[in-house]
Amino acid sequence: MSPYENLSESKWLDKTKELVDKHPLTKDDIVEVVLDSWEGILKTKIAGELQIGVDIFPSPQILGNYLHELIPVFLEKKYPGKWTRDLEKKDKDLVCLTDSQFSSEIKTSSNPNNIFGNASYGQEDSSNASSKTKDGYYIAVNFEKFNPKNKNFTPRIKKIRFGWLDHSDWHSQSASSGQAATISTTVRDNKLLLIYDADRGGKQY
């Protein structure tokens, strides 16, 4: 059952704060590991020769994939025996080894504000569409894209959100060619806490 079952929208934010406080990772943990992962990406050289952001400028999809890989690895190193990356198809992106209810999905986007899931997230039966449930904790990260025409521009992590989404919060794009699922601004702003905003000085707590 969803933790938001039978709750009016006006009570969603309080429930989200309760769920976030219950999670073993603190807001500091999440912000620090996301920023450390991003800093690590910007320092990376490919084949020991090509500096990211100087010689090559990875696409947003590649940058998002790097974040997906690094965030769980950094947390595993910080809290060995408690966290790991996904090892099986049924696993969330970030696996809590001590209590699976705290395992979390990681969503990243170069959109300034919004996050997206693949089309299966918006299917009515998406909770059963694959072996990985879409209900649970989410870490959502918005980042800036590289600008190859301006090599002096250093992209930033723009926003980090943390909270809980149910599979029913996702809605597929209406176009038949739509390949993504979205969440409404009401869901985003009440079920995902904004814990970092680069344009507002960083941490938001």
Image (cartoon, rainbow, N blue to C red):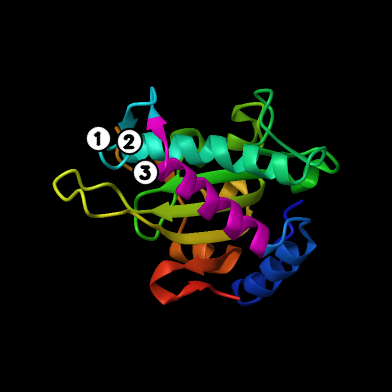
Task: Kindly identify the amino acid type of the residue bearing the numbered disc 2.
Answer: Gln
Query: Is most of the magenta stretch helix, strand or loop?
Result: helix
Q: Which residue is mark 3?
A: 173
Task: Kindly identify the amino acid type of the residue bearing the numbered disc 1.
Answer: Asp
Q: Residue at x 30, y 54 (%)?
A: 154
Q: Residue at x 60, y 52 (%)?
A: 33
- Taking depth in this image into account, of 62 and 40 the one nearest to the observer is 40
Tag 1 secondary structure: loop
User: What residue range appears in magenta?
Assistant: 28-45
Q: Residue at x 82, y 37 (%)?
A: 81
Residue 43, horizontal then vertical, whole percent = 42, 42
- Give the CA separation, mark 3 to mark 2: 37 Å
Q: Are marks 3 and 2 in contact (CB under 8 Å)?
A: no
Q: Which residue is mark 1?
A: 55
* Label 1 environment density (alpha carbons within 10 Å; few <14, some 14–19, many ≥20): few
Q: Quadrant of residue 127?
A: top right
In the displayed structure image, the side of residue 185 where residue 192 appears, left or right: right
Q: Which residue is mark 2?
A: 51
